[in-house]
Image (spheres, rainbow, N blue to C red):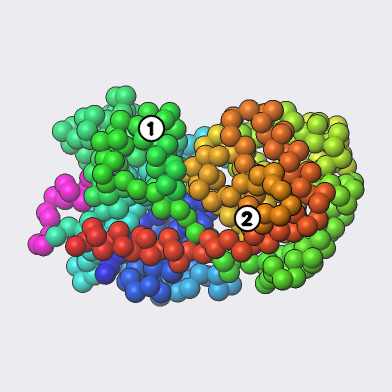
Amino acid sequence: MKILFATSEIYPFVKTGGLADVCGALPPVLHQLGAEVRLFLPGYDAILKNLKHPCQIAKYNGIGTIQDARILFGILEHPDGHFPPTPAYVFDSPQLFAARHPYIDEHGRDWTDNHIRFGAFCHAAANLVHYDPLWRADLIHGHDWQCGLIPLYSQRLASPPAGRIPKFLFTIHNIAYQGLFDNWHMVGLGLSWDDFTPTGLEFFDRISFLKAGINYADYVTTVSPTYAREICETELGCGLQGVLKNRRDHLCGILNGIDTQVWDPAHDPYITKNYSFDTITKKIDNRKSLIKEFDLRIPTDRPLFGIISRLTPQKGFDLVLKITPQLIAEKCALIVLGNGDKDLESGFLALQEQFPHQVKIINAYNEIFAHKIHAGADCILMPSRMEPCGLVQLYAMRYGTPPLVRDTGGLADSVDAYQAHDNNSPITATGFKFYRDDAIDLLKSCQTVIQSFAVPKVWKALCINAMRADFSWDISARAYLDLYKKLVG
Ligand code: ADP
């Protein structure tokens, strides 16, 4: 089966969040399972630099007034071996993609031409049936709003090719990002007003790329079963609940996996001491070096809490800001790796100033520190208000660092919560959960972490259970493959 895998981010080349991790890890596994996968990517610098044997297969002069755009075909490969050689089409347009952050300018504002950047990207993906008549995809698997217009352009091709156009599977990684643009861009995007309807791509008089993806796709997935339910039934659908309910029979959730080679405490080059579940006692050396590197002061029987995240209101870290003084009173410490929302950043900076040896914020995006914190912290906090899947808790478990999560989306599906238990029953939990979007609830759960941490037998069982949980891509990739087969028929 031929699959065109279209995405605007792919680890280890271009990453702003979990989308990149998924799109970097899933295609190689699909390939191992027998699918013939080709990528379709925007021509960011990092992609062009790593595209081997590129050749131009077509000039692009579809929509917009874009100079010198073309479709390249080559083999995408990463020099450090983190990404196996994979055939890729690249939509190369220096005007749209060169020397730019994928979505925002240096002031954090969306690029003003995002509609045409990703509109043309979608248009080019849909037209690949013309650009490369020798390789016709059976199915296009597109991700998030940046790919939302592909099925509409496919269905409205000016000169449809003979035979079937590819089926389209649309995966929503986060419904809060919808690709909303003013309606006068319909013309520039080469779209017909006939599609500017509530059952098409119109959303409160604007163009919604995401809604187009939902309405015109053959099938829609999201990244966990609980999130699939939440977006249909609650305000987590961000206004699209009704649209999703209409497509309920063509919607399901498939939990993300993780790249178990990139995230492997037994071979991780960035951490002080490698370990696996039978040598988990070595994990303590990673805690020690983290404490030393950041000059933290914390007794050995108190947990070091960690945060690795974009700092956005969605992630619920305002709750952590509220309870940190109580955690410090309990002699715990907190290390935060993240940037984003200015209020959250300054909240953590203020706490760091107040408690310089108990709170540390690394106000940056840094992959190496992410690995060090997964290995060195004792508990990773994810108090998210909504979390489609969440990868950080999966990485944390892989590193034997039980996460404390709010019971939502993929956090609900992936973490088995610790319950106070009698001494005779075995511990099966892999982490901790709290339920209400509430600081007191979070604090109570942190106190359970503190009490459990003080009992080595309990803590060790939790860490080992977490490490043993299997979140490799194999299971999820098979679920995608089954779906592809069902759709292609
Ligand atoms: P989201 O996609 O909402 O950002 P996920 O948990 O699904 O959340 O994925 C986040 C990804 O981004 C993980 O790979 C995580 O390690 C990484 N990440 C987030 N913030 C940082 C940071 N400041 N430094 C390094 N990695 C980060």
In the rendered image, which residue does mark 2 sit on? Answer: 428
Q: Is mark 2 within 8 Å of ligand 1?
A: no
Q: Quadrant of residue 200?
A: top left
Q: Does 448 sit above or below residue 8? A: above
Residue found at the far top of this picture: 204
Along the viewing direction, whichever of 303 and 388 lies nearer the viewer: 303
Q: Does 300 sit above or below residue 486? A: above
Distance from disc 2 to disc 1, alpha carbons, whole Å, reads: 30 Å
Q: Secondary structure at mark 2?
A: loop
Residue found at the far left of this picture: 162
Quadrant the C terminus occupies: bottom left
> Which residues fall within the magenta stretch?
151-163
- Along the horizontal axis of the image, is 145 left or right of 111? left
- Along the horizontal axis of the image, is 231 left or right of 195? right
In the rendered image, which residue does mark 1 sit on? Answer: 233
- Along the horizontal axis of the image, is 346 left or right of 383? right
- Name the residue located 38 percent from the left edge and 32 percent from the top edge: 233
Q: Does 307 sit above or below residue 28? A: above
Residue 434, position in %: x, y?
Answer: 62, 37
Residue 55, position in %: x, y?
Answer: 34, 71
Along the viewing direction, whichever of 277 and 21 lies nearer the viewer: 277
CB within 8 Å, label 2 to label 1:
no
Sequence-wise, the earlier of marks 2 and 1 is 1
Q: Secondary structure at mark 1?
A: helix
- Name the residue located 58 percent from the left edge and 49 percent from the top edge: 415
The answer to whether residue 152 is seen in the rendering is yes
How many badges with numbers are in the image? 2
Q: Does 440 sit above or below residue 389? A: above
Quadrant the N terminus occupies: bottom left
